[in-house]
Amino acid sequence: MSMPITGAEEQEAEMRHTPRSLVRYRSSDKQGASHANVKNGARKGTQAPIQRASRVRTTEGYPPQVTAKLPESEIMDAPRGRRGQAAHPLVYLGLGMLGMLVLWICLSLLLGWGQGLLDDMRYGRPRTFQMDMRVGHNEQAGQPSHFIALNLNRRIQVIEISGGDPAHTHVYTGPQLYGAQDDLVPVTLRFVDVNGDHRPDMIVSFQGTQIAYINEQDQFRPATPAEQPQIERFLQSH
């Protein structure tokens, strides 16, 4: 008596006699159909089959990684990068000299400005110096002579008002200055006996220069070349 053959047994027998290439082709068709069913189910609102999570690979069982560590001496001797390289000593020397030059220029300008401000307060503009002195010129009334030293447009001038009387006024013209800022040079006066005749002579001073005017009769005159050596010796000692 023969047993009835089921559908599963028929499918298994068919698989045995079917070539392998056809079996693979059918399996791929089944996978494609399954994917299509999943998409259709997602569109219809059915729940898609849950996929298995991929297995996470771990490093257990593998040999540990060994990191080589350099000795500290080799690390210290390792070449530095460009950012860590020290500058040449001449660079620091040049920067220091440049800084000193800038500082010197700034100090010079500051001192010049301060000196100009002080001269403005003392001598004004144009530079003017005044003093009274008894020199024996028209001073019978007991009034001393008045002297005004001017640097007017770089020309040095001395005005003497003998005995305080404007009618006995003498003007002594000095040298001409030619520097760009020489119109701000102060001019001062002092009176000393430079030739030993017991009469006060007039010394005009400016920019470290001294010019002597000899007191003769009722006014002053420039010193002669023969008198210059004696005057220079006196000025150097006083």
Image (spheres, helix red, strand yellow):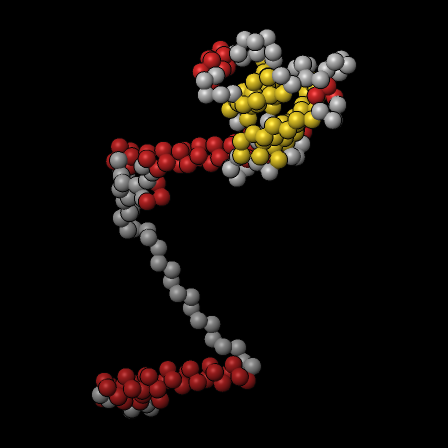
Q: Residue at x 57, y 11 (%)?
A: 193
Q: Residue at x 41, y 36 (%)?
A: 98
Task: Give x and y (percent) for residue 53.
Answer: 42, 66
Describe residue 159's horizontal placement relative to residue 22 as left or right: right
- Residue 169 quadrant: top right
Describe residue 12's horizontal placement relative to residue 227 as left or right: left
Q: Residue at x 67, y 24 (%)?
A: 160
- Residue 46 quadrant: bottom right
Task: Give x and y (percent) for residue 112.
Answer: 55, 32
Please say if 112 is above or below 161: below
Residue 232 visible in the displayed image: no
Q: Residue at x 57, y 36 (%)?
A: 154
The one nearer the camera, 28 or 134, is 134
Describe residue 94's horizontal placement relative to residue 232 as left or right: left
Q: Quadrant of the N terminus?
A: bottom left
Residue 205 visible in the displayed image: yes
Name the outermost residue toward the right: 141
Task: Give x and y (percent) for residue 230.
Answer: 47, 13
The one nearer the camera, 77 or 152, is 152
